[in-house]
Amino acid sequence: MMWLDRVIKSLLPREEHFFDLLERGADCALQSANVLSECCSARSASERQALVSRITDIEHAADAVIRDVYDALNKTFVTPLDRSDIYALATDLENVSDRVHSTMMRVVVHAMEDLPPASQELAAKILEGCSEIHSAVKLLRGMKRVAEINRHCKAIAKLEHDGDQIFRSAIVDLFNTEKDAIHLIKHKEFLEGLENTLDACDDVANALEALVIKNA
C-alpha cells in the first residue's frame, strides 16, 4: 500500500511555499554570520556591543521561521519534501542563528574588552559556511541540481574540519600564554561558541545530504 500512497500524493498539488520558509531560514543564518564577522573585526568593545542588538533581531526572525514552518506543516496535507525533513532542516538552520546569537551575547555578559586572536579567522569560516548553506538551500526547489548541492555540503564539511584545527591551535596557544584565569575563561568560552557555530553549519550540511539522498 505504500507505493499506492506515494502515487496518490504525487498526483496531488503540493505546497511549494515551504521552500520560501527554508530560504528565509538560510537568509537569517547568513545575516547572522555577517554580523558575527563584523563583531570579530570590530576595533572596540563599544562597536561589538552595538552589534548585539542587530543579532538579537535576526535571531528573533529565525525563531519566527520555525513557528511558521510548524504552523504550515500542521495545515498542509501534501508537502514537497517529507515533513520531518522539512522541520529538521528548518531547525538546523535556526540553530546556526541561535549559536551566533549566544556566542555574541558573551561579549555583553562577560563584558569582554577584547576577543581571542583566532576569532576573525573562525568567524570568516562561519561566514563562508553560511554562504554555502544559502546557495545550497536555494537549489532545493525541484531537486534538479543535486551535484551542486552536494558540492556545497562538501565545502561546508571542509570548512568545519579546518575550523576545528584553528580552534584546537587557538586553545593550545591560549593555555600556553594567558596568565589571567578569568581572561582565559572568557576567551575560551568565546572560541567554543565559534566552534559550536561551525558544528551547527555542518549539521545543516548533513541534513541537506540526507534530504538529497531521499529525494533525488
Image: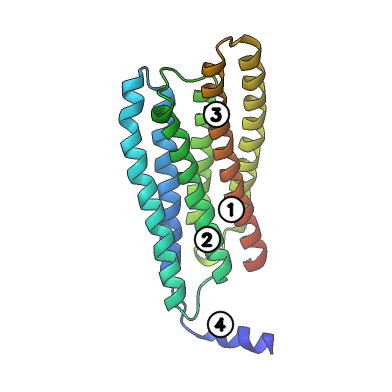
x, y percent for residue 216: 63, 66
Determine which residue is flagged by label 1: 149
Q: Secondary structure at mark 1?
A: helix
x, y percent for residue 211: 62, 62
Q: Quadrant of residue 40?
A: top left
Is the residue under label 4 in contact with that under label 1 (CB below 8 Å)?
no
| Amino acid at dot 4 | Ser
Mark pair 4, 2: CA separation: 17 Å
Compared across the picture, whether 76 is left or right of 214 comes to left
Is the residue under label 2 in contact with that under label 1 (CB below 8 Å)?
yes
Q: Secondary structure at mark 2?
A: loop
Compared across the picture, whether 208 is left or right of 100 comes to right
Whichever of callouts 1 and 4 sits on the residue coming sooner in the sequence is 4
Determine which residue is flagged by label 3: 189
Whichever of callouts 1 and 2 sits on the residue coming sooner in the sequence is 2
Determine which residue is flagged by label 2: 140
Q: Quadrant of residue 154?
A: top right
Q: Secondary structure at mark 4?
A: helix
Determine which residue is flagged by label 4: 10
Mark pair 3, 2: CA separation: 35 Å
x, y percent for residue 138: 47, 55
Whichever of callouts 4 and 3 sits on the residue coming sooner in the sequence is 4
Front disc: 1 or 3: 3
Whichever of callouts 1 and 3 sits on the residue coming sooner in the sequence is 1
Mark pair 1, 3: CA separation: 33 Å
